[in-house]
Image (cartoon, rainbow, N blue to C red):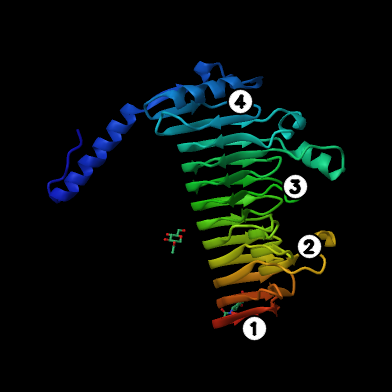
Amino acid sequence: MMKIPTHYSPSTILILSMVLLALTSSTSAIKNYNVLSFGAKPNGKTDSTMAFLNAWNAACGSTDSTMIYVPEGRYLVGAMTFKGGCRSPQIIIRIDGTLVAPADFRVLGKSDNWLSFEGVSGVSIVGGAFDAKGTALWACKASHGNCPAGATTLSFTNSNNIRISGLMSLNSQMFHIVINGCQNVHVRGVKIIAAGNSPNTDGIHVQLSRNVEIISSSMKTGDDCISIGPGTKNLWVERVTCGPGHGISIGSLAKDLKEEGVQNVTVIRTTFIGTQNGLRIKSWARPSSGFVKGVRFSDSIMRNVQYPIVIDQNYCPHNLNCPGQVSGIKITDIVYEGIRGTSSTPVAIKFDCSAKNPCTGVRLQNVNLTYLNKAAQSSCSNVVGKAFDLVRPNSCL
Ligand SMILES: *[C@@H]1O[C@H](CO)[C@@H](O)[C@H](O)[C@H]1NC(C)=O
Ligand SMILES: *[C@@H]1O[C@H](CO)[C@@H](O)[C@H](O)[C@H]1NC(C)=O
């Protein structure tokens, strides 16, 4: 028994004993399911898909809180769907090993997702490495062969109270992690790795979700480190390092005519290294019911970033499906504060807003971005806002 020093106040002692009680009672109530006892083989060769699915079904059907344990080793698994409606109130998936995708990219490539959690609640993934072996698919795409679109490594749809911590996602075929239609999602200490030229390998994509936190994570990838789609509300991003990659992007929006807005997004203490963009808001030059409202980009370091601060509402690749059109997305209340470092192109701040819906309430404060040790430039069209304190390049607001 722990000896409690006598100088602690009665309330501290009460809290301590409650913590102890909570710890002991929660661990004793957790039921363990080791994938090895369901036939998984940690040799990287034997297909362990059924073993993982059976472990999930057993945990899901239990009335206790459960833990699915994946010991050290490499596990070959194909596409798996983990469905909700579980009796277990809490499922912790603790992974000390590595999940590896089949060597032939076409096996996973025809599925939308590698691991897909659908309609689950109270699921935590702790640790683990996910090696999707995407390089062969990227090569196929680069050679314009007849290749499948590829699978997202880890997808959560229509799920609540999700925690993801300490995992590594390596060489995904498509997106690494997708959070779609979810509430209360905490992502912490995630490491994402893919080549800088790998196609569509976004780090974490969030859409139609609220109360999502992404904290203390690093992303090296070929597309956006974090992409924020329509219907995102109350998103908090903190201490994220990005690069290579395309930066942190709200959008692309206005892909569809009817779209939910993005609101209340905070992105703080981020570092961008050699990325294409830093902090970006991007929409197609197409009519849409969507909007972006209430975004704070704060305390960010840029190192050799092509476009550190950018709003682009005239996205229309190859001039297809949008010539002569303007974006219907209304962008308001966007704050950039404490953004500093270097741009690798002369224009470090670019606001290219919609002619029909100018951006309003844009605020720049304490921004210091340089280009080749000289002042960079800023460029403004259809934007209304204000600059405060030091802003370099000189604000065009
Ligand atoms: C905005 O989102 C944060 C979490 O990211 C939350 O704490 C805050 O309450 C939200 N604000 C509003 C007005 O909903
Ligand atoms: C702006 O950044 C440059 C380059 O990092 C630095 O030399 C300069 O002192 C900064 N200016 C201010 C006012 O902080």
Q: Secondary structure at mark 3?
A: loop
Residue 176 appears left or right of 35: right
Q: In this picture, is 298 found above or below 119?
A: below
The residue singled out by tag 1 in the image is 394
Answer whether residue 247 is visible to the viewer in this image. Answer: no
The residue singled out by tag 4 in the image is 75
Which amino acid type is marked by label 1?
Asn
- Residue 71 location, x and y as percent? 51, 26
The earlier-in-sequence mark between 2 and 4 is 4
Query: Residue 198: which numbered mark, if any?
Result: 3
Q: In this picture, is 172 found above or below 243?
A: above
The residue singled out by tag 2 in the image is 316
Residue 147 appears left or right of 367: right
Residue drawn at x 69%, y 63% is 283
Res 48 → quadrant: top right
Q: Residues within 10 Å of mark 1 (few under 14, many from 20)?
A: some
Query: Residue 174: which numbered mark, if any?
Result: none
Disc 3 C-beta below 8 A from ligand 1? no
Mark 1 vs 2: CB contact within 8 A = no
Residue drawn at x 22%, y 43% is 16
Mark 1 against mark 2, which lies toward the viewer?
A: 2
Mark 4 vs 1: CB contact within 8 A = no
